[in-house]
């Protein structure tokens, strides 16, 4: 059976505790509070990879998307050479769900889409 191609769906690390070199450069790193207060703004810092990813014309991160559960929150389009795949955004979470999964997806023009998640607890 042939291996799955990098452009077939969303790529995730096979072993999150032992990332490959490619995974270290592509899996989004999400830095945000574990607990947030409903209705109050909080910051989410996102870096593409725990190692810097190149941003050259021939090889770069094209965009990042931020989701809470199935709700779309933001899309950040990046330009090669003039940007870095590091962003900080401010989100506000309602109180409908006590826990939510924050999901960040990014797309590398050479290595496809990569995704990372983080659980966030919402208090009143």
Image (cartoon, helix red, strand yellow):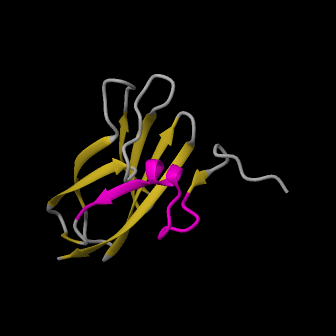
Examine the structure image and report whether residue 31 is included in the region drawn in magenta: yes
Estimate the x, y position of residue 94 in percent, counting from the top left: 25, 65
The outermost residue toward the right is 1
Query: From the viewer's perspective, is 57 left or right of 83?
Result: right
Please give the name of the residue rendered at 45% of the width and 45% of the height, measured from the top-left corner. Answer: 106
Q: In the rendered picture of this protein, how many numbered marks are placed on residues? A: 0
Q: Is residue 41 above or below residue 75?
A: below
Estimate the x, y position of residue 8 in percent, counting from the top left: 67, 47
Estimate the x, y position of residue 55 in percent, counting from the top left: 40, 31
Residue range in magenta is 12-32
Query: From the viewer's perspective, is 19 left or right of 35?
Result: right
Examine the structure image and report whether residue 72 is included in the region drawn in magenta: no
Please give the name of the residue rendered at 34% of the width and 75% of the height, measured from the top-left corner. Answer: 99
Q: Is residue 49 above or below residue 60?
A: below
Query: From the viewer's perspective, is 111 left or right of 79?
Result: right
Q: Quadrant of residue 111?
A: top right
The outermost residue toward the front is 21
Q: Quadrant of residue 40?
A: bottom left
Please give the name of the residue rendered at 31% of the width and 24% of the height, measured from the top-left corner. Answer: 82
Q: Which quadrant of the figure contains the N terminus?
A: bottom right
Q: Which quadrant of the figure contains the C terminus?
A: bottom left
Estimate the x, y position of residue 93 in percent, counting from the top left: 25, 62
Please give the name of the residue rendered at 46% of the width and 22% of the height, measured from the top-left corner. Answer: 57
């Amino acid at each position: 059976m042939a291996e799955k191609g990098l452009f077939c769906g969303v790529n995730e690390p096979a072993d999150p505790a032992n990332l490959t070199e490619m995974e270290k450069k592509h899996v989004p790193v999400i830095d945000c509070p574990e607990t947030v207060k409903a209705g109050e703004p909080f910051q989410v810092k996102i870096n593409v990879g725990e190692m810097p990813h190149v941003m050259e014309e021939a090889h770069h991160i094209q965009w990042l998307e931020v989701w809470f559960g199935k709700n779309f929150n933001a899309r950040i389009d990046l330009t090669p050479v003039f940007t870095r795949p590091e962003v900080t955004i401010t989100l506000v979470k309602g109180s409908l769900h006590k826990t939510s999964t924050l999901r960040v997806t990014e797309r590398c023009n050479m290595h496809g889409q990569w995704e990372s998640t983080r659980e966030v607890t919402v208090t009143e």
